[in-house]
């Protein structure tokens, strides 16, 4: 076969310091060939590409999504080459295969790429990934703040000290902590260090939220973020988290596909006449799923346009306002109906989150110039 008509499928097993490379020809009888390991520097990648281009006129690359991110994908696509970042959980594997090496992984990727059995993931643009990183940094700050607060309260509980006020970490609680005196000087040092850690994490969270609010107006997906806030329970943070994690929501052909991606679809094991459903699959983006479930709790109350929601609706087109009210009526009614049937509250709110995602999909389709 001449070079002008040759396609070469290239499997890459990517690590921090090395990349294992394997190639496979276009014909069914072509056996994959392990090229060998290369470095991760740009010069190493350029050398590998030049070497493979001497053998084929068209190169198609694939590697697993992982901790190394999308740097390699952007490098190859900037060179005008085809590249897929594939979902590791959706790669076909033999049940009895218990041997895993870089060489075997690269060869398997090349073979499956040729057969069309690999499922690619959505690769965000650089600016979208930056907002996503900022959103995830906020989540990490919240987790650290909760951990610091828990350590402080656990320490005081060991000393037999507990706050009996109505709410924790409000002004009254802080005044209570400012008057705290521990039994020994050593324990007083521990208390002050734990309290300082709480203040440091709270300040970090505030800084990240300020930066997030600063960068949002210039983000290309900000119109979608503003539109999604028409929904009850979807304030700015929930909307930013959802859009940053999902990217262009309208890339899904239907709300069902979106629910599948979020892992909000019930698992199922059916055979013959037997049909058995279990909990949700959780086979998707956990960050967006968590944000949707938190927002879904707002629908346990009767449908109502609060002053805060009304203020957000004022600057949005009427079709989006209509979808917002339709969502309120349906989801509030469904929440009450499922609760009345004796469903567990967590099951109810998960079902509401699944439908809330569908209304988000409908609103995103009404936003002009979102891409």
Image (spheres, rainbow, N blue to C red):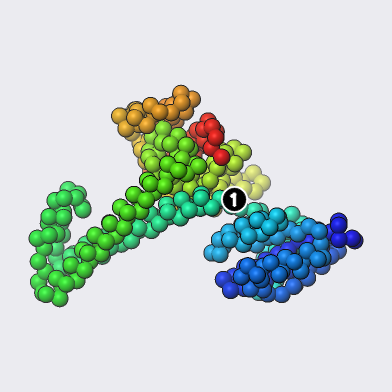
Q: Nearer the viewer, residue 193 or 1?
A: 1
User: What is the x, y in percent for residue 120?
Assistant: 64, 53
Question: Where 278 sits versus 229, above or below?
Answer: below
Give the x, y percent position of residue 182: 11, 69
Give percent across and percent down for residue 130. 48, 53
State the residue at coordinates (65%, 62%). Answer: 63
Would you name the residue on which mark 1 appears?
122
Task: Determine the residue positioned at 14% across, 71% down.
Answer: 188
Instruction: Tell me if I can see residue 72 in this picture.
Output: yes
| Left or right of 308, for residue 134 | right
Residue 239 higher or lower than 326, as above or below: below
Give the secondary structure at mark 1.
loop
Dividing the picture into quarters, in which one does residue 353 lie?
top left
- Of the pair 273 and 369, the residue shown nearer to us: 369
* Relative horizontal placement of residue 354, taking residue 212 as reference (left or right): right
Which quadrant of the figure has residue 61?
A: bottom right
| Residue name at image x 14 percent, y 51 percent | 172
């Amino acid at each position: 076969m001449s070079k002008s008509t040759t396609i070469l499928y290239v499997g890459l097993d990517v690590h921090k310091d090395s990349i294992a490379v394997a190639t496979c020809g276009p014909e069914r009888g072509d056996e994959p060939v392990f090229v060998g390991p290369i470095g991760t520097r740009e010069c190493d990648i350029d050398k590998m590409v030049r070497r493979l281009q001497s053998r084929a006129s068209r190169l198609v690359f694939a590697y697993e999504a992982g901790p190394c991110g999308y740097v390699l994908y952007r490098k190859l696509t900037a060179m005008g080459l085809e590249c897929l970042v594939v979902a590791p959980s959706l790669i076909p594997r033999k049940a009895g295969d218990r041997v895993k090496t870089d060489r075997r992984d690269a060869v398997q990727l090349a073979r499956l790429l040729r057969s069309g059995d690999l499922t690619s993931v959505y690769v965000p643009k650089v600016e979208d990934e930056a907002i996503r990183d900022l959103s995830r940094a906020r989540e990490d700050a919240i987790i650290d703040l909760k951990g610091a607060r828990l350590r402080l309260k656990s320490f005081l509980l060991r000393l037999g000290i507990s706050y009996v006020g109505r709410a924790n970490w409000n002004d009254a609680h802080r005044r209570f902590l400012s008057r705290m005196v521990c039994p020994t000087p050593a324990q007083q040092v521990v208390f002050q260090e734990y309290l300082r850690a709480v203040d440091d994490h709270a300040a970090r969270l505030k800084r990240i939220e300020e930066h997030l609010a600063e960068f949002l107006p210039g983000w290309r997906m900000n119109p979608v973020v503003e539109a999604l806030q028409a929904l009850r329970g979807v304030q700015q943070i929930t909307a930013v988290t959802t859009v940053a994690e999902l990217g262009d929501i309208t890339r899904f052909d239907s709300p069902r596909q979106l629910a599948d991606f979020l892992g909000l679809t019930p698992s199922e094991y059916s055979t013959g006449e037997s049909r058995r459903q279990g909990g949700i699959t959780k086979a998707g983006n956990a960050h967006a799923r968590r944000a949707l479930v938190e927002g879904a709790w707002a629908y346990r109350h009767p449908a109502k346009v609060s002053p805060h929601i009304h203020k957000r609706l004022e600057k949005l087109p009427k079709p989006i306002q209509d979808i917002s009210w339709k969502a309120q009526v349906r989801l509030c009614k469904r929440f009450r109906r499922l609760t009345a049937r004796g469903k567990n509250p967590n099951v109810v709110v998960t079902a509401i989150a699944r439908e809330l995602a569908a209304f988000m999909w409908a609103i995103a389709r009404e936003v002009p110039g979102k891409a």
